Amino acid sequence: MSKKASYILTGSIVAGLIILYFAYPPFQNFINETWKILWSNDEDKISAHFESFGVWGPVAIIIVMILQIFLVVFPSWLPMIVAVLAYGFLGGAMISIAGVFCASTIAFYIGKWLGDEHLRKIIGSSKNKKVEYWVSNYGFWTIAIFRISPFLSNDAISIIAGMLGMTYRKFIFATLTGIIPLSLAIAYFGRNTDKLKNGLYWIGGAGILIYAIYVYIDHRKRKKETKQTG
């Protein structure tokens, strides 16, 4: 798919969802009701709500995950738990992976559309260079860790990756590398809230720790090589 076609497709999806929300009352009611139920913390009510949609239930969850791009205060892992509650281990994991795939792709191409100049205006040239260095050297594993840790901003890293010109193939492979184990973990622990919280903390914490150690060792190695060549 060409860049132009990608931008058009991404923009059309986003614009279509926004127009549909304001122009079609049943869709607006569905979104409002779903949001209210998701925040109710009533697992039985959440599960029953999505099961009532039948074959359209998974589509509804994926739409919620896409809309979550624009609502950063809404936890990205909540729709994944909903998928598990409604469709079990395997079905919930597959829906979660599909939802993150779609949402990440849209966020990535939004970043592509905004471009590097937009990021430079937001954070300044000096910080932009640091971010470029980080993405160019550690971009793959940065995205993977952001995906595997439920407490980091998945959508922000997707948009930034697009802004800085990372290839889509590298980006989506890194996304799947992180989101598949997270989806399986949430699917495994999803029906036990206490186990889920502990599991997410362990997964996110361990991933960040391992990543920090890797970056520290690699950064020191790079600095040493630079001094030797200089």
Image: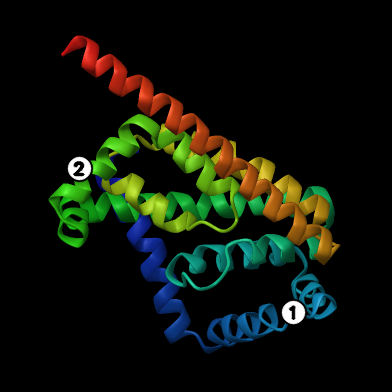
User: In the rendered view, would you say 32 is above or below 108?
Assistant: below
SS assignment at label 1: loop
Residue 129 placement: quadrant: top left
Residue 125 position within the rendered picture, expressed as x and y whole percent measured from the top left: 13, 50
Nearer to me, 5 or 152: 152
Marks 2 and 1: in contact by CB < 8 Å?
Answer: no
> Quick check: 152 above or below 134?
below
Residue 197: image quadrant is: bottom right
Instruction: Give the total of numbered labels.
Output: 2
Q: Which of these two is toward me, 171 or 95?
A: 171
Mark 1 crowd level (few <14, some 14–19, many ≥20, 10 Å Cα) = few
- Label 2 is placed on what type of residue? Lys
What residue is rendered at 76% in x and 57% in y?
198
Amino acid type indicated by mark 1: Asn
- State the quadrant of the C terminus: top left
Numbered label attached to residue 41: 1
Tell me residue 119's x, y (percent).
Answer: 22, 55
The mark lying in front, picked from 1 and 2, is 2
95 vs 88, left or right, is left
Element carrying mark 2: helix
Residue assigned mark 2: 129
- In primary-sequence order, the first of circles 1 and 2 is 1
| Disc 1 from disc 2: Cα separation | 42 Å
Q: Quadrant of the N terminus?
A: top left
Q: Could you tell me residue 215's position as x and y percent?
A: 44, 32
Going 74% across and 45% down the picture, which residue do you hit?
A: 184
Quadrant location of residue 121?
bottom left
Q: Is residue 38 left or right of residue 218?
A: right
Q: Residue at x 16, y 56 (%)?
A: 124
Crowding at dot 2, Cα within 10 Å, few <14 / some 14-19 / many 20+, comes out as few
Asked whether, in this view, residue 14 is left or right of residue 154, the answer is left
Instruction: Relative to 146, say whether 212 is above or below.
Output: above
